[in-house]
Image: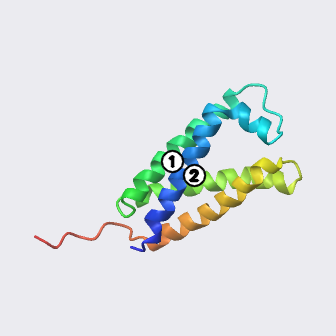
Amino acid sequence: MPRWIPVLFWIAALYDGVLGALFLLAPDLLFRMFEVTPPNHMGYVRFPAALILIFGLLFVAVARNPVRNRSLIPYGILLKVAYVGVSGGYWMAGGIPGMWKPFTIADAAMGALFAWAYVVLPASPPADRSA
C-alpha cells in the first residue's frame, strides 16, 4: 500500500473535522468574517456541518486502516462530488461567494485523490499466510 494514502485520509479528516466544527459552532463568525449574508436559519448550516464532522470520522477510519476500510472510500468520493457539483455549478453560473471557492478546489482535489486511492488499494486484505 502506498504511504500517501493514510496521510491523505488523515488530512481529509482534519480538513472536514475543522470545517465541520467551525460551521457547527461559529457559523455567524465565519459569515461575518467573509462578508457573506447568512441564511435565515442556522439549521441550514449546522446540519451539513454535523454531516461533515461525521465524514471526518469516516476518513479517520480509512486513515487507520485503508485496506480494511476501502469500502468506505466511495462515500467520501460521493461527498466530494456532491459538494463540487453543487458549488462548482453555482460558481460557473456566477452565483457563489468567494468564501466557498477554496473549498470547491480543495474538495475537487481530494475527490480525485480518493478515487486514485480506491483504484490503487487492493479490493480485499491480503490473506494471512501464517497458518
Q: In this view, does 1 lie to the left or right of 73?
A: left
Q: Can residue 69 be seen in this view?
A: no
Give the image location of residue 92, x and y in percent: 85, 57
Q: Which numbered marker is on residue 56?
A: 1
Q: Which numbered marker is on residue 131?
A: none
Q: What residue type is labelled 1?
A: Gly
Instruction: Please tell me which residue is depicted at 47% across the width and 70% down the height of the picture.
Output: 4
Q: Which numbered marker is on residue 15?
A: 2
Q: Is residue 74 visible?
A: yes
Q: Which amino acid does label 2 sit on?
A: Tyr
Give the image location of residue 73, x and y in percent: 48, 58
> In the picture, residue 110 is in which quadrant?
bottom right
Q: Is residue 46 left or right of residue 95?
A: left
> In the picture, residue 121 is in which quadrant?
bottom left
Examine the rendered structure and indicate whether residue 23 appears above or below residue 118: above
Give the image location of residue 82, x and y in percent: 66, 51
- In contact (CB < 8 Å): disc 2 and disc 1: yes
Q: How far apart are marks 2 and 1 (CA)?
A: 8 Å
Of circles 2 and 1, the one toward us is 2
Instruction: Please tell me which residue is depicted at 51% across the width and 52% down the height of the picture.
Output: 13
Pointer 2: residues within 10 angstroms few (<14), some, or many (20+)? some
Closest to the observer, 74 or 41:
41
Query: Which quarter of the image is occupied by the C terminus?
Result: bottom left
Dot 2 or dot 1: first in sequence order is: 2
Closest to the observer, 98 or 120:
98
Instruction: Please tell me which residue is depicted at 34% across the width and 66% down the height of the picture.
Output: 124
